[in-house]
Amino acid sequence: MQKPTKRILSGVQPSGDLHLGNYLGAIKNFVSLQKEYECFFCVVDLHAITVWQDPKVLADKTREVTAAFIASGIDPKKNNIFVQSQVPQHAQLAWIFNCVARMGWLNRMTQFKDKAGKNSENVSVGLFSYPTLMAADILIYLATHVPVGDDQKQHLELTRDIAQKFNNDFKTDLFPIPEPLIFGQATRVMSLRDGSKKMSKSDPSDYSRIMLTDTADDITLKIKKAKTDPLPLPEYVKDLNSRPEAQNLVSIYASLQNNSLEDIINKYKGKEFSLFKKDLIDLAVSKLEPITLEMNKLKSDFAFIDTVLKEGKDKAITVAEPVLAKTKEIIGFLG
Ligand code: TYM
């Protein structure tokens, strides 16, 4: 089996509307990486059902994430865009990895603790073993690099541990030890209402996040209402460290504009937030509105989206199947 040297896999859940964190922390980076890498971009519906999903909505959201990838600039001809549940090798490898990963490793996952909260006895078993499926998503393609936002770092460390343990236990070098690609100015976009909390789909306040489905008016209102502190913008980037809301808005601006934090601070130092926010609104609308319009157009073209997903699925299976077959042979399963 030929081993790739520059292959990417990443996934996005169809568990609600995509927000600015998903775009700046992940999808925007996918777009820039597609030139250099062979890419597999997966809509991870198996991950989505670790918490309740309305069956009437899930299919729409799966197409919507696909549309968002393409509207953001991922070329479906050059890259493999597909749905996780349509490639059964993911779930099969995940079971094997459930038998490789240790309870202690999974018990340390902070995202599980955050999501389960005080309710840990009552959440699904899938939510707990979620990272082993993520490891399978990556390793079933022998992916070497994984672009994600900062919140997925711990899951990638676990993926590396699983690959290493499998290779050691079975005295093989089948699985690569994949490298996380966490880069850009907005690796962790924070809530617009509270700079200490991550922007997320599950925050009860709509004003905490900008959605890729938002209109220009929605974006304007949300940025106007975004929490700031009473001081003007600082002289130096380091002064943002103690001002989480200011840091978040400056990072969003820098990422949307593909500039450094220094450039933005040099432009706005000493200026009031009212002026900065006005420019941020113009920038956000100019960058996001075309994506939203294209996404809305594409997502209702089921024939187009489903053709892209079918082609992606077929290609994904041709790569995943031999890796699963090799894994089973190594373990000692009958062929
Ligand atoms: P998900 O669907 O929660 O998020 C998709 C991507 O968006 C990034 N992200 C953020 N980046 C910056 N700031 C934020 N506030 C923010 N919120 C989300 C995430 O880091 C992610 O890159 N478990 C993954 C999906 C997954 C996956 C995989 C990723 C399943 N299998 C294999 C990589 C490789 C998740 O729930 O992402």
Image (cartoon, helix red, strand yellow):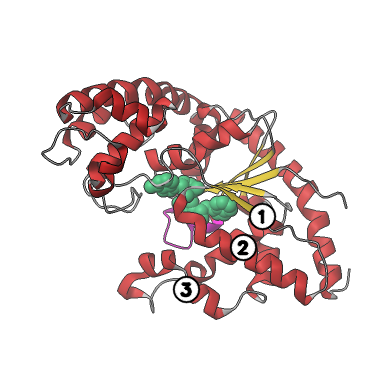
Camera-nearest residue between 238 and 18: 238
Residue 234: image location, x then y, percent: 22, 35
Q: Relative to 292, is 114 above or below?
A: below
Q: Which mark is residue 159?
A: 2
Residue 19: image location, x then y, percent: 38, 40
- The image quadrant of residue 251 is top left
Predominant secondary structure in magenta? loop
| Distance in Å between CA atoms under marks 3 and 2 | 14 Å
Residue type, label 1: Pro
32 left or right of 263? right
Residue shown at 22%/49% (left/top)?
194
231 left or right of 111? left
Camera-nearest residue between 143 and 255: 255
Residue 177: image location, x then y, percent: 69, 58
188 left or right of 101? left
Q: Which mark is residue 178?
A: 1
Determine if the C-beta at disc 2 is less than 8 A from ligand 1.
yes
The residue where tag 3 is placed is: 108
Determine if the C-beta at disc 1 is less than 8 A from ligand 1.
no
